Amino acid sequence: MDSHFMLIFRRFRKHRMAFVSLIALAAMILLAVFAPLIAPYGPNKVAGGFSKPPDAQHLLGTDQSARDMFSRLLYAMRVSLLVGAMATLISTVIGVLLGLIAGYFGGWVDQAIMSFTDMVMSFPYILLVLVAAAIFEPGLWSIVLILGFVDWPGITRLVRGSVLSLRETVFFKSDITAGMPRRYILFSEILPNIIAPVLVYATSVFAISILDEAALSYLGMGVPVTTPSLGNILKGAESITILTSKPWLWVPAGVVIIALVVCINFVGDALRDAIDPKND
């Protein structure tokens, strides 16, 4: 097992951009996690003059409410990463469970699950997210649940396809013949063999969830404005005056969003190649 992970790590390390992206992503996550220790001010504390440009006291300046932008950016990363991670976890759990059930049992169970999956996927993704966000009251956990319950169909289809392939293998038929419990077959035999593609797919869901949170918060349908998030920081830059003459109010948040999404996608692509046995 250790040698297998080392082999994957060596393949992954060959992708230099992905390796650098992994280090950058880890650094951003650490900054977000330890924001209360690193940030010089609280996210909503009045710390200086109004809309002051960056200086030695305020590395990224202050916003229209005289709050330190560097502190707000650290806390905003924390919120956006939390939304992305929790939404990815929820959608992955739902998708894996439904995919396992559909692929293992087949028949009318498979047809019912896949019909529902196809129905959800038939709706335009962004429209589905916007409608759900308009129905429920804006809030941190509302956005997490909305994104988590919208992003699962792709994982369900991926897992179902993998399970259907595994059903034709010798070890699966041997377990059935031996009368092994379904729980053992599903979670001890099948699940470990499909975890790699699921993990790779989850990285794309993570990146999309971060973008969705930023978009919904920018539209006023996401995280409450009192809670710092990357989308809420961008929302404060709607004025043409701010866009043209006060870039410190929106450029750092935009750069962080781009950096997070690009790093996650690089890591996901390299992870897919590293796990693929054809790359031996």
Image (spheres, helix red, strand yellow):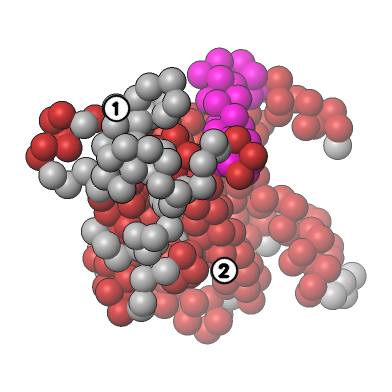
Q: Nearer the viewer, residue 198 or 202?
A: 202
Q: Position of residue 174 (x, y in %)?
A: 84, 62
Identified by mark 1, the residue type is Pro
Inspect the magenta stretch and tell me whether residue 278 lies in it: no
Q: Nearer the viewer, residue 107 or 225?
A: 225
For image coordinates 50% across by 36% down, the residue present is: 264
For image coordinates 38% across by 44% down, the residue present is: 67
> Which disc number belongs to residue 53?
1
Relative height, residue 203 to residue 19 (above, below): below
Disc with the residue nearer the chain's start (2 vs 1): 1
Image quarter in which the N terminus is found: top right
Which segment is the magenta one? 11-35
Q: Position of residue 92 (x, y in %)?
A: 57, 60
Mark 2 in CB contact with mark 1 (< 8 angstroms): no
Relative height, residue 103 to residue 82 (above, below): below
For image coordinates 51% across by 60% down, the residue present is: 87
Would residue 226 appear left or right of 278 to someone viewing this image? left
Residue 162's image quarter? bottom right
Q: CA distance from mark 2 to mark 1?
A: 46 Å
Residue lying furthest left: 240
Q: Give the residue at mark 2.
A: 94
Identified by mark 2, the residue type is Ile
Image quarter in which the C terminus is found: top right
